[in-house]
Image (cartoon, rainbow, N blue to C red):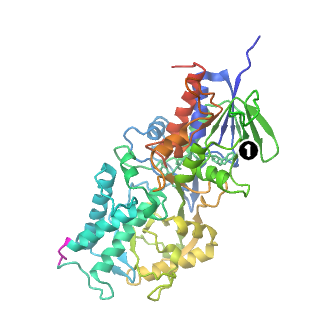
Amino acid sequence: MVAKKAKIVIVGAGIAGLTAAYRLYAISHDLFDLTVFEAGDRIGGRILTTVFSGDRIEMGATWIHGIGGSPVHAIATDQNLLEESSCNWERMDGFPSGPLTIAEGGFTVNQDHLARPISSLYRRLMDDARTGDAKSADGHPGVGAYLRQGLLQYQATRTASTNTGLEDDTWSLEALEESLFAMEECTERTCTSADDLSDLNLSAESEYREFPGDHITISKGYSRIIEHLTSALPPGTIHLGKKLCLIKWCSGDGASPERSPPVRLHFSDDSVVDADHVIVTVSLGVLKAGIMKEDGKGIKFDPALPDFKREAIGRLGFGVVDKLFMEMETESREAFPFMRLAFRQGLEENGSMRHASKIPWWIRKTESICPIYRESHVLLAWFAGKEAMHLESLDDEEIISGVHATLEGFLPSIKTGCRIASVKRSRWGTDPSFLGSYSYVSVASSIEDLDLMAEPLPRGKGLEVPRLQILFAGEATHRTHYSTTHGAYYSGIREADRLLRFYNVGN
Ligand SMILES: Cc1cc2nc3c(=O)[nH]c(=O)nc-3n(C[C@H](O)[C@H](O)[C@H](O)COP(=O)(O)OP(=O)(O)OC[C@H]3O[C@@H](n4cnc5c(N)ncnc54)[C@H](O)[C@@H]3O)c2cc1C
């Protein structure tokens, strides 16, 4: 008699789900009945490479963050994805350097005496936070208050250089330092996805790990990592357009009937699939929607998720980060600088500007506008939080006119001719398959919540072997590499290995 294969379902065809599938299949071959269900009409999730105005761009994951030891870098190298490509690609010349820092109104900020000292101050403060040497401000647990305290201390003790190059009399030295510091904070918002840095947990910063070495982009496109993972799976493993709505499981505490197999999955097309194990890899945003809202978004659980899981999902932060690509009009295609933007910080309580400005509010927390490589006529700006959500709601014309107002507000004396012909932006915040971009540890949560995210259900009692009905993978389940592709990758390996150990397969 042939034993029935255990049925393993993976929900989500992002890097976590596909890594789990790849690992399970590579080690067990066809020992399991393995299926991946994906709500969208494509694989890759928050990895999405496309082409805009002839250049290869990334709508989501962009960088391999440190090449020393990164599993994503290892795949990219093995698969020759880092070799020269016939198509020009985003940041093919590495991190942009030699910024031109401009203050609102069109005044070029002196790099040596103003921009660089504030950048160095900022870096030193964040380095201290990462090494655990940071002292919170008045006991406030957030990064925001700590940074502001650092700026005030700096301003109280620095001797103002006599050579600041501050020839614009509408700016005071303090106001300019404030704007330059805010510009650095805007980068932190996009790096972490925290809309408000006072919600970013200062003590958790020291637990976050980065790989050493260069940060690079993938010449053949990030999506090729995804293609590599799927190429090894048997045809028919991945099913697109299958949105999971409800997971019924057997909690073992009398709250649900026992069933065999124990997990029942209900999809939006009314189909039902039974499984022995399900690995849920959907974003933290989708999990939050499932526990918090009754609007049909997200995934429901029956019985409901236990308190420890619901609370971790609720506490952890999950913000919105979007990218806006802008194609310059043919007539205005001169080399565009890597332009860092020091906005005036004069917003009144009600949001109106103290001074007249046509620059819309949603662009005022953008750190820079930069060509995607030195000679490109495609410019890029990053958005986070409320500004990103608003950007998602605008039509292209409104975006273009806001960008023109900004360029006019910053470059009157340097470059008046740059016009934008078309734009392309991501919409991670409103896309129901993501409902945000990546996770962060908020002040309400702690690094332990990431471990709770990773715990399978039901929890084993005493010495009982956990039954592994519902397993969780995805970037928001990795304690030290959350928010990244490699964190998601590691989580897929972790959950595949958990099942392989359960069945005593492999090493
Ligand atoms: C703008 C942006 C820039 C980024 N930059 C970087 C970077 O430079 N470097 C880096 O390392 N990381 C970066 N990231 C983060 C990185 O993209 C993610 O951490 C990683 O891709 C997450 O992978 P995942 O498999 O955990 O989740 P996902 O990619 O979200 O995969 C989950 C899958 O589940 C599917 N799904 C959702 N709901 C359902 C449902 N109900 N039923 C079935 N399927 C469902 C989704 O469609 C999705 O395909 C960036 C992300 C964004 C948005």
Q: Nearer the viewer, residue 495 or 202?
A: 202
Tag 1: amino acid: Leu
Viewer can see residue 419? no
Percent of width and height locating residue 116: 27, 67
Query: Above or below — where is 62 with respect to 393?
Result: above
In depth, the one of 78 and 5 nearer the eye is: 5
Q: Residue at x 42, y 68 (%)?
A: 367
Q: Residue furthest top?
A: 1
Q: Quadrant of residue 248?
A: top right
* Residues packed near mark 1 inside 10 Å, few (<14), some (14 to 19) or many (20 plus): some
Q: What residue is drawn where x is 75% and y is 29%?
A: 258
Using the rendered image of the protein, determine whether residue 77 is visible from the camera's viewpoint. yes
Residue 495 colored magenta? Answer: no
| Number of callouts | 1
Residue sitting nearer the eye, 241 or 251: 251
The region drawn magenta spans 157-161
Which residue is under mark 1?
246
Which residue occupies 70% across, 32% down? Answer: 235
Task: State the predominant SS element of the stretch in magenta.
Answer: loop
Q: Is residue 181 above or below residue 210?
A: below
